[in-house]
Every structure is written in structure tokens, then in C-alpha cells.
């Protein structure tokens, strides 16, 4: 497929590998956020419960877009949790405190997802893959704003 969209096979193969790693990050972030949504407790339950649903719904859409980009490049998206668990983003289990939940989301984006997306965007730009670079740029812009908002919530 990469030949059909004008990319070098070796570069599209590397991009697919990088996107599959990102897919694992997103799957873990999704599960963490879903867990926060279900389990958060405290006086800001209603506010955080709704916000976490908004975030995991966005992540779910992005998971599909990333997988479809891998397919567009001519490769198969990974679809097993054993592969996803190779992500540096770890499962965050049994968290109920709202601040800890927000910190978990913030750390996932700022320490793992956004840096990986920047790496993918740079590689994609160098490979003349505007589609992947644009996708990463859009995600980064939105996630930087989310990071700012979550940081403000935490008083940082």
C-alpha cells in the first residue's frame, strides 16, 4: 500500500511500527481513563466522571484513526493486549482519588504519548508522510491543551 501512496517502503514500515507502539500507549491510556471514570469518588465525582468519559471517548476515536493509518501504510495494526502491555505507560489500578486520576491522565500524555507522537511526527515529516505528520500534529495540539487544563485543575 505504501507504494500506492508514494512513500518509501522502508520508511512506511518504520512508521507502521512506531504507530503500533503508539496504539499500545493509547489502549493503556484508554483503559486507565475508563477505570478512573468508573471508580472515581469524592466531592468532584460528577465533574470528573463526565470529564473522564469525554477523554476516553476521544481516545477511543483516536485508537481507530491510528489503526486505520497503519492499514493505510500497508501494515496490520496490533490488536492484542500482550502487545499493548509492552507500552511504557502502565496500568493504573484501583485508583479512586480524583487528583490521582487526573495526575494519571496528565502523566500518560505528557510523559509517554505526546513525546512519542512528536517523534512520529518528525519521522513522518522526514519521510514525506504528510498524512501521519498531520494526524500527530492535530493530536499533539489537542493534548497540549488538555495537559494545560489538567495542570490548572491540579493547581500546577
Image (cartoon, rainbow, N blue to C red):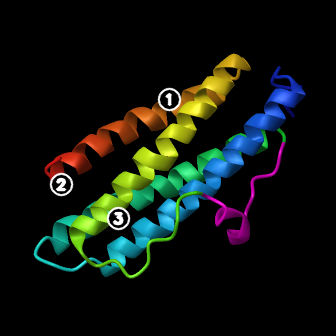
**View extreme (left): residue:** 43
Whether 45 is drawn above or below 89: the answer is below
Report the mark closest to the observer, 1 or 2: 2
- Determine the CA span between mark 1 and mark 3: 23 Å
Residue drawn at 81 percent across, 51 percent down: 76
Residue under circle 3?
53
Can residue 117 be seen here? The reply is: yes
Residue drawn at 22 percent across, 65 percent down: 99
- Image quadrant assignment for residue 3: top right
CB-based contact (under 8 Å), mark 1 and mark 3:
no
Instruction: Indicate which disc, 1 or 2, sits on the residue closer to the N terminus.
Output: 1
State whether the magenta stretch is mostly helix, strand or loop. loop
- x, y (%) of residue 79? 73, 63
Residue 95 within the segment the image draws in magenta: no
Can residue 73 be seen here? The reply is: no
- x, y (%) of residue 4? 87, 26
Part of the protein shown in magenta: 75-87
Left or right, 142 with respect to 123, comes to left
Residue nearest the observer in this picture, 103 or 75: 103
Amino acid at each position: 500500500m505504501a507504494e500506492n501512496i508514494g512513500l518509501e517502503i522502508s520508511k512506511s514500515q518504520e512508521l507502521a511500527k512506531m504507530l503500533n507502539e503508539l496504539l499500545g500507549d493509547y489502549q493503556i491510556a484508554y483503559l486507565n481513563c475508563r477505570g478512573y471514570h468508573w471508580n472515581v469518588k469524592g466531592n468532584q465525582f460528577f465533574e470528573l466522571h463526565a470529564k473522564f468519559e469525554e477523554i476516553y471517548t476521544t481516545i477511543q476515536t483516536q485508537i481507530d484513526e491510528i489503526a486505520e493509518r497503519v492499514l493505510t501504510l500497508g501494515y496490520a495494526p496490533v490488536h492484542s493486549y500482550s502487545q499493548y502491555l509492552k507500552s511504557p505507560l502502565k496500568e493504573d489500578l484501583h485508583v479512586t482519588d480524583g487528583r490521582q486520576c487526573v495526575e494519571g491522565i496528565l502523566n500518560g500524555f505528557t510523559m509517554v504519548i505526546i513525546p512519542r507522537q512528536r517523534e512520529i511526527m518528525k519521522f513522518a515529516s522526514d519521510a514525506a508522510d504528510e498524512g501521519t505528520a498531520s494526524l500527530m500534529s492535530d493530536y499533539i495540539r489537542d493534548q497540549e491543551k488538555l495537559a494545560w487544563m489538567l495542570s490548572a485543575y491540579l493547581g500546577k
